[in-house]
Image (cartoon, rainbow, N blue to C red):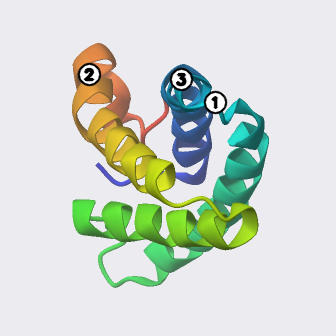
Amino acid sequence: MTPTLAGRLETRIVLSFFVALPVLVFAGMANIIFIMLAVGVALDFVYNYLQYKRWDGDWPLVFSFIAGVTEGIILWLIIDIRIPIYVLILVLTLTAQVLLGVFFPYRRFKGGRIL
């Protein structure tokens, strides 16, 4: 699946509120969800630009993981927390790649859009 900008944004919002928020509430850091969402949305525009600059316009899984690590580093620099961000990156990456495909099977044909 090659995500479109709308698909990236929808996926980010769904993952932020239904996966990341419960993890952050459990870790006692629910107040950073909006910072995480703002950084992610800003970087989605960069990822979309980079995706369309590639010769095949594809966005492989390794790029998604690198993007997650990049976002984690940026959040670490902004908020100065260490361990939970990288755990959150792994949880969000696995959820996006595995569980969203199970619960929203047609998402892959709609450029990552959930709705």
- Give the numbered dot on residue 105: 2
Q: Quickly name the residue at label 1.
A: 28
Q: Is residue 66 left or right of residue 81?
A: left
Give, as a three-letter code, the residue at label 3.
Phe
Q: Secondary structure at mark 3?
A: helix
**In whole angstroms, how far apart are the C-alphas of marks 2 and 3?**
29 Å
**In whole angstroms, how far apart are the C-alphas of marks 1 and 2?**
33 Å
Q: Is residue 35 left or right of residue 19?
A: right
68 shown above or below 25? below
Residue 69 showing in the rendered view: yes
Q: Quickly name the residue at label 3.
A: 26
Give, as a three-letter code, the residue at label 1.
Gly
Q: Is residue 80 left or right of residue 48?
A: right
Give, as a three-letter code, the residue at label 2.
Pro
Label 1 crowd bin: few (<14), some (14–19), many (20+), radius 10 Å = few
Q: Earlier in the sequence, mark 1 or mark 2?
A: 1
**In whole angstroms, how far apart are the C-alphas of marks 3 and 1?**
5 Å
State the image quarter where residue 59 is shown: bottom left
